[in-house]
Amino acid sequence: MNLSHIISIFRFLFGGTKPSSGPLKVHWDIEYKCNSRCKTCQRWNGPYPNDQLTTVEGLDLIDELADLGVMTLSFSGNEPLLRDDIYQLIAYAHIRKIRTSLNTNGLLLNEKNIDKLIRSHLDMIYFSIDGHTPELHDRIRGVPGGFQKILDAKELFGKKKGAPILMVNTVANHLNIPYLDKIVKFIKNENFDGILIQPAHNIKTFFEQIDETTVTPDDVPILTEKLKFILKSYGNFIPLQKKYFKEFETFYTNPGKLYRYRCSAGYITLDIRQNGEITPCPLGFASGGYYKKGNLRKLWYSNKMNSIRMKIKNNDHPICWFACIVPINLIFSSIRRFEIFEFFNYGFMRHIFRKLK
C-alpha cells in the first residue's frame, strides 16, 4: 500500500467521495458462461453475449490496473476457468505485482489445469461448497459429482509445491442453513485454509434464486443460532468479523438499517464486467462506462464515477451483504467508531494480510 492509498483511505474516512488513488481491490467477472446449475443464482441460464474483452484487451487492462496501484485482483465469472486464457491473465497480473485470487466451482480442475494455475502463481483460490455431503452440495449446485471434483482438486493441490491458499465460499440458503455448523466442521477437517459464509441474495439479473433455496422468516432464527455456534466453536478459521455475521438477521429482517455502514464500493473496490463495463460492485446498479485501451484512469476519476460515489455515500444504492465487500466496509466503520477490537480481529486481519502482502 502506497502513500496515495493511505491518503485516499483517510479521505474516505472523513467523508470524501473523490479518491486520490486507484482501488485497492478489483473484482473481474471475466467469463459469461457457467457449467454449474446453481439454485442460488440463475446467471448460468444466459444469454451469453459475444462481447467479452479479448486476451490482448485483458492484458492491457491488467497493465492499467497495475498503473492505478491496484493491489489485488479477483478473477470470477460465472466460471472463469471456461476461458482458455485465464492462466495467461493470472500470470501477467503476477508479473505486474498484483496479487490474484480465483473463484471456481471446481468442475474443470484436473491435474493439468492445477499445474497451470500453480505455474501462473495464483495466490488464492475460492471453491464454492454449499454442503457437507455430496447430496446436499450437488443438489444446490446442480451438477452431480461436483462435490467430489472439489475434494479431488484439493487433494491434488495439497501434493504440489507452490499451491495457492485454499479457501471455501459457502452461500447460506434455505437448504443448507440447518447444516451450516456441519459444513464448517467438514471444511476444517478437510484441511482447507478457511471458509467464508455469506447470505443468499435474491437480486434481479445477477443473483436470482428459486423458491427451493430462498431464505424464509422461519430460517432466520436458525441461521442466527448456527452462526453464533460456529463463531464460538471455530473462531479464526472463519476470517471475517463477528459483526459481519451478527448482521445476517438484519439483512433478512430490516435491511435498511444496514445503511449505517457506509459502502466503500467504487472507492476502495471496483467491479469490471466481462465486456469491460466498470461498475462499483457486484450488483451492477450503476455504470461508470466501458474500458477501452488507455481510458481506465480517466474512467476511474471521471465525473460519472464521482457522481456514483456521492450516491453511494448518500445511501442511494441497493443493499447487499456480500463477503467480498461488506467486511471492508465494516473495517472503516470500526475505525470511525474507534471499535479497536472489531478492527483487530486476528483471523480477519491475517486474511487481509495474505491477500495484500
Image (cartoon, helix red, strand yellow):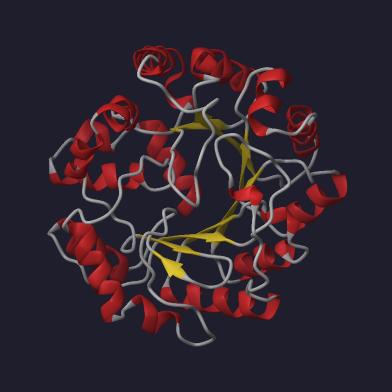
Picture residue at 27% right of the left edge, 52% below the top? 263
- In x, y percent, where is residue 37? 68, 39
Q: Residue furthest right?
A: 112
On the question of residue 167 being in view, the answer is yes
Q: Residue furthest bottom?
A: 294
- In x, y percent, where is residue 296? 44, 80
On the question of residue 357 being in view, the answer is no
- In x, y percent, where is residue 19? 26, 70
Q: Is residue 92 left or right of residue 301?
A: right
Quadrant assignment, res 187: top right
Q: Is residue 61 left or right of residue 16?
A: right
Asked if 227 appears above or below 58 in the picture, the reply is: above
> Is residue 304 or residue 206 the one in the foreground?
206
Asked if 313 appears above or below 218 in the picture, the reply is: below
- In x, y percent, where is residue 91? 68, 65
Asked if 234 appears above or below 109 in the picture, the reply is: above
Picture residue at 29% right of the left edge, 71% below the top? 4
> Is residue 210 or residue 108 the one in the foreground?
210
Picture residue at 79% right of the left edge, 47% below the top? 114
Q: Quadrant of the N terminus?
A: bottom left
Label tally: 0
Q: Residue furthest front?
A: 211
